[in-house]
Structures are given as structure tokens and as C-alpha cells.
Image (cartoon, rainbow, N blue to C red):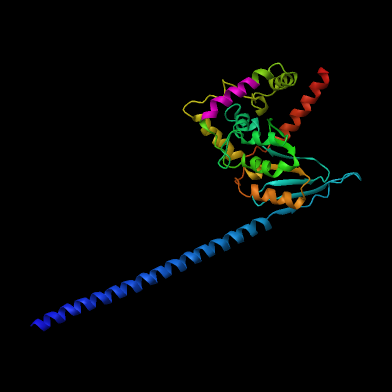
Amino acid sequence: MENKKIKNENDKINNFIDYEKEEKKRKKKNDQIFYIGSFLILLIGIIIYYLIDKFYVSYTEVIPFSSIKKSFSDKNSYKLIKLHTGLEVLLIHDPSTKRSAASLAVYSGSINDNTIGMAHFCEHMLFLGNKKHQSPSIFSDNLQKYNGLYNAFTSKDKTVYFFELNNNGFIEQFDLFASLFDKPLFNKIYVDKEINAINSEHEKNRNNDLFITDFIVKNEANSKSPFKKFECGNNSTLINENNQLRQELIYYFENFYTNDNMKLVLLSNYSIENMTKFVEDNFISGYVAKSPKLKIQNKLSYTYYKILKQIKEIVQ
């Protein structure tokens, strides 16, 4: 009886030892599967990243434009490209320039305002921080280091942004410039401040001859024409109740600041190849949805500026 009891105890111990061995084997096998799986996932990720990077670069389309006529003294090189996002870019290589510049035009202006002054308000707010560079002053502060300048303006059918600076700061500043149009913060704390800035701009323009002439043209326009709109905006039109204005701003940006609705120009002493890389690195993402552009924009713009030119001739 005693021997049987001892035998049972030994069997339990042996079973426990066997169980421990099996658990260790199972754990070792699971660890191996985990490490191999992790390695394979990492490897697949690297391959996908490599292929995507290669795909994007190869998808940059070079657009022939033989219509450019250069003088014999023009030493510049030109290249027109189109990214897969729809953004068209003109690259200009000037080997002798000491200053580099870039400009981006968005084909949306006051014509597309739902809230009067929204296009102009969007122009102001884009300089006040984005997901990559959140400081509202980093763009202007960096320009100062390289003796640079920048500005922007909103017209009836377009909004244009531009900067220039010494060549040695171009790469750094172009990254900041491209970031303006990618995930802007539209921070609530700056909304009221920029409304006041726009109102001050409007008050200043009231005594400007060009704006007075513009007002005369709009006053004579058909009441249903988009040219009748008040463009600048002021405290009376840009009313921020319950954060509604910010929501309208986000809607406007996401619908009109799309890559297919923009044109970009770079001029620098950097090579065409280097500038192509700058653009691909900084504008490879972005909104690519088709913009609800007004088909009558160009025709209206032509008519408006033709009338404006005639009025200026009469006034002068």
C-alpha cells in the first residue's frame, strides 16, 4: 500500500515535470513565431515603403511645353511637372541668382465665399500654425534669418502666396511653406485676432483709389453676379458665434485647397533635379479631391478686368 502511494506521488511528479517541459517547448515555439512574425511584418513594411516611395517618384509626370520662347541671353532652365496628386509645378533654375523664391496660387477667391470674406480670412489663418510646425511665428522668424520676405493676396478668383530669401535658406523655408497647406490648425485662439486684423485692413483700403474704383465696378454689376460680393470681409461679416466660423473655414479649406486646384512655381540656383526632389518630398500628400470650382470663373475674371482697365483709363 505504501509502495503504491509512493508510486502515485512519483507519477504526479513525473507528470508535472513533463507538463513543465511541454510548456517550455510551447513558449519557446510561440516566442519563435512572434519574433519571426515581427521580422516578417517589419520586412513587408520596409518593402511597401520602398515600393510606395518609388511609385510616387515615378508617378511625377514631366509635361512638355515647347511654347516657352527664350531669348538668347536667357540662361535659365525650365521644367513643368505634375505630381500624382494633380499639383502642377513650374521649376526654374537660374544659375546666377542669389535669391530663391516660391509662389503657390490657389484657384479660389471671393467668388467662392459662402461667408463674406472667407477666402481672405483663410489666407490669414494659414500662416498661424499647422500640424508639422505649430508655432504661429516660425514661418516669418525663419525668413528673417535669411533676409527674406513674404506676402499673400486674395482676389476674386484666386489666392496667391509667395516668399523669397537668400539661397542658403531655401530648403528650410520651402518645407515651412509647403506645411502651410497641409493640415493647418486654424487655432481658435487666433480667430478673433485675425478678424480684427482683416477689419483694420478693410478700414485702411477705404481711402485707396484702386479699391474705390473696384467698388464702383461692383456697384454697377448685376445683383446676382458673384462680382457684386464684398471681398475683404470685416467685423460685420466674419462673425464667430459658437465657433461656427472656424467650422466654415475648415469646410472652405478642404473643398478648395486641393492639389488639383493649385499651381506652384519655384525659382532658385538649385538644380532642376534638386527642386523636383524638394517638391516631391513636401507636396507628395495633400487633398486630392476634385474641387467644386465655378466653371464661369475665367470668363468672369476676363470681363471684370477688361472693365476695370477701361475705367482706369477714363479716370487717368
Residue 158 visible in the displayed image? no
Q: Position of residue 149 (x, y in %)?
A: 71, 33
Does 265 sit above or below residue 276? above
Give the main secondary structure of the magenta stretch.
helix
Q: Residue at x 23, y 78 (%)?
A: 14
Residue 48 visible in the displayed image? yes
Q: Residue at x 65, y 50 (%)?
A: 281
Q: Position of residue 282 (x, y in %)?
A: 64, 47
Of 166 and 286, nearer the camera is 166
Q: Position of residue 137 (x, y in %)?
A: 61, 33
Q: Position of residue 288 (x, y in %)?
A: 61, 47
Q: Name the quarter where the C terminus is drawn.
A: top right
Q: Name the quarter where the N terminus is drawn.
A: bottom left
Tell how many labels: 0
Q: Which residue in the rendered view is the most extreme toward the top?
A: 207
Of 316 and 54, nearer the camera is 54
> Magenta region: which residues?
189-201
Q: Residue at x 40, y 68 (%)?
A: 31
Q: Residue at x 55, y 41 (%)?
A: 131
Q: Is residue 234 magenta?
A: no
Image quadrant assignment for residue 293: top right
Of 151 and 60, nearer the camera is 151
Image quadrant assignment for residue 6: bottom left
Does 160 sit above or below residue 69? above
